Each structure stands twice: as C-alpha cells, then as structure tokens.
Amino acid sequence: MSLHYEESDNNFTIWDQKQLETVYACRVEPASADEVSKALQVLVNSWCKFAVKCGGHSRYPDDSVSIGGVTIDLGLMNATIVSDERTTARVGGGALSRQVFAALDPYGLAYIGGRVGQVGMGGFTIGGGTSVLAAKYGWALDNVLEYEVVLANSTIVTASENSHADLYYALRGGGNNFGIVTSFNVNVFPQGPVYTGSRSFADNQTNRFFEEAEKTFTLEDSVDTNVGFEYRYTYSDQEGWTMSSIQRYAEPVMNPAVFDALNSVPALGNLTGAIKHSSEQHKLRNIKLNDVNDNDRRNVFASLTHYPSIVLSKEGIAILKEMTEKGNLTGLNPQLISYSIPTATMEMSRTRGGNALGLDVEGHLIKKFDVFHPYIYINYGNKGQDVFGGYGEKYRQRLIEVSKAVDPSGVFTSSGLWTGFFKVR
C-alpha cells in the first residue's frame, strides 16, 4: 500500500477544480481488497473521515477527495481479467473506462463503459452507468454479475443474485452507501468496429432538429438497437448557441441510413464520421474517450428525466438561455445534453432480482404520453436534488434497510465518515 501526503502528491489526478483544490490529510493507494479492508479498519477504529476515489470524475469535495481526511485511491486496482469463456470479465474497482476497453480490445470484446475515458468503473457502475450501447444491452449496473465489497466492519463479501442478494440489489443504483466496491464481475460481448458521426447546427435549425431527433430516439428504442444517439445544446463565444448531435452505430456501416432524416437538416458543416478500428481508440472509445484535460473547470450538473416532449425540450432551451444571459458570466460553458432511456434498459433492470432505480414503467418509456418522470440519474444529479426520492419511496426504504443491515454504525451515511455524494440516510 502506497502513502502520499498532499504537499508532495504530484501524481494525483482529479477531474473537477473544486475537488482538485480540496486539502486532504493524506492519500493511500491499496493494491488489493485486503489492503482496502486494513485501511478501512484503521479509519473506522479511529473514526477518521475519508473518501474513496476510483476515476475522480465526481464534482464536489468529499465525493472522492476527503476534506481534511484520508483519500483512498483505488487507482492501482485497475486490472481486467477475461474469463476463459470470454463472456465475463473481472474488473478492478479503480479501473478507468479507457483501461477496460483497451484490455478487452485484443479479444474483440467490449463492455458497458463510460462515454469518457477517465470515468472510473466504480462510481460509474454503482450509480447506474448510462451507455452508448444501452439500446442493446441496458446500463452498466444490470450487467454486473458480482460485486466484491469491503463493508464497514472491514469484512470482504461477494454480492450476487445468490449471495448477499439484498446488498447486490442495493449496489445496483444505490451509490456509495453500502461499502467500498473493489471489483466487478461483468458481462462482456463481441464487438467489432463501430461508426461514430457528429454534426453541428445553427440555432435557427433547432426546432426542425428536435422533430428529427425525437424520431431518431424512437428508432433507437424499437426499430434498430444498433443506434446510439445524443444531442447537446451549448454556447461558445465563437459560435453563439448551437446544437450538435453525436451519432453512433454498433456496426461498421459508414453513414447509416437510419440517420438520413436527421442529416437532412441544414448544418454548419459537413457530417464528420468514421469507422473506429482496433488501432483507433479501442473501437468503442468513440466519443471523447481519450483523456479530457479540463480539470481547470468547475462543473455543476443537474438531471431531469421526462417522457418525449418537443415542447419541454424547447422550454428547457429557453430556460437555459435566460439563466445564462441573466448571469452575464465569462468563461461559462452551458450545455443541455439529452439522450434516451431505451426499452432494453428497463427490461434489463428486472433481471437477477431487479435494481433500485424505479424505472419500472409500463410499456415503452419512449411511447408514454405524460411528460414528467421523477427519476434522477445519480451520476448527473446536483446537490439538493432528491435522488432517492426520485427512485420512489418503496425503493428508498429498501435501500435504507440494506444500509442499516450492512452498516449499522453509519460509516457510509451522511453523519458518518464518508459523507460525500448522495446519501440515502
């Protein structure tokens, strides 16, 4: 186990400037679950504050960098071991998305990983894990077969559908409320080269873009699960307000016809697209999955889930513009990012005992007529948002019961030792 002190800790990387400025007492780097257990035992016995860092892609102090306490950095626990059958892989709790994709690539395999390369396996997965392949395979949390977890009493357990089933359920969306996950046994699947394209549109094309975007989301959900699509509305000093789309297709098809209607909208420039081969960003690392050097930024996210509504999308843009213009701030990069929650995600959420997200709507989410849905994606949630309330009261209560059972002393609660991120109690 390595030990580092803040004043000479030159190899510590964190994504958000707010966390980067956090002053911690020391950082420890365990190399195994046993070492995590020993470190946690010392911290609990001395009742010392701590936080756990996987990829360090969270946004607030105490989330993954402890304020004045010990930061447990899982970065050395980053190995990916593929099973002999090549259907599952054991992934270390400190692995980054790009590291896992790189390890799977020689086997012609992929997994449900993050959109950005430095996102950590740990926080990404226990928060849900939205994916560019969600229409085919669902989210990351529902592709985990086993969690290796260090509990508050320093015992190491393996949680699965058949062992510690309540804990297994709670870790599927319950965040950092139950222990320190040191490894995941995940589904992997064959994946060849894929297509990725992008295009930008002037603000005066936004309304037409919305019409075609909603049709594309419907295709992704029910017609062609190879489709992965998202869009973002953003402002820059150079171009003003613009809309941009990211088009993905999980087959080596250049300019897939499924995007033709969307690409008929007049754009600021030509469509840029490419087939990603094994020598290029490890195939699925197809949208900013290289490291993004933006740790000089202070990031604020908030999340909202709704049924398809062009009216609501337009209203969201109007609110974003009003907030930005009233603030009159320089250096601001406001963005409104949208993608769908496909049917496959909800179907997968019912497997192996179900998860805690509360997305058990009847029928296809994409085809409901009501607009608002209470679910808040925890990894994009903002401080003050009631994430677990958005899951639904029966799901919240079950998570509280599991938390009390595995952590009776409250180590991982809002009044305990790791108080960052969203707490269920």
Image (cartoon, rainbow, N blue to C red):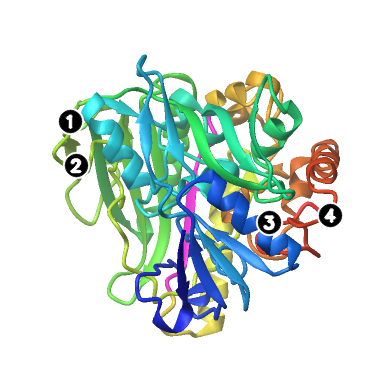
Does the residue at mark 2 contact the one at mark 3 (Cβ under 8 Å)?
no
In the image, which disc is placed on residue 254? 1
Q: Is residue 35 left or right of residue 297?
A: right
Name the residue carrying label 3: 41
Kind of residue indicated by mark 2: Gly
Q: Residues within 10 Å of mark 3 (few under 14, many from 20)?
A: some
Q: Residue at x 63, y 38 (%)?
A: 307
The secondary structure type at the circle numbered 1 is: loop
Q: Residue 402 vs residue 265: left or right?
A: right
Quarter of the rendering occupied by the C terminus: bottom right
Residue that carries the numbered disc 4 in the rendered image: 409
Q: Which residue is mark 2?
A: 273
Q: Is residue 101 above or below residue 297?
A: above
The residue depicted at 40 percent of the width and 18 percent of the height is: 87
Q: Nearer the viewer, mark 2 or mark 3?
A: 3
Residues under numbered marks 1 and 2 in contact, where contact means CB atoms less than 8 Å apart: yes
Query: What's under tag 1, amino acid-wise?
Result: Met
Disc 2 crowd, CA 10 A, few/some/many (<14, 14-19, 20+): some
Q: Mark 1, residues whose alpha carbon is within 10 Å: few (<14), some, or many (≥20)?
A: some
Question: Which of the two residues, 251 or 55, is positioned nearer the viewer here?
Answer: 55
Q: Earlier in the sequence, mark 3 or mark 1?
A: 3
Residues in magenta, as a range = 333-342
In the picture shown, does residue 64 fall above or below 172?
A: below
Query: Is label 1 or label 4 in front?
Result: 4
What amino acid is found at the position of numbered circle 3 in the picture? Gln
Q: Position of residue 315 (x, y in %)?
A: 59, 57
Regarding mark 3 in the picture, which secondary structure is present there? helix
Question: Are the residues flagged by discs 2 and 4 in contact, CB closer than 8 Å?
Answer: no
- The residue depicted at 31 percent of the width and 36 percent of the height is 248
Label 3 – label 1 distance at C-alpha: 54 Å
Quarter of the view holding residue 173: top right
Which of labels 3 and 1 is toward the front?
A: 3
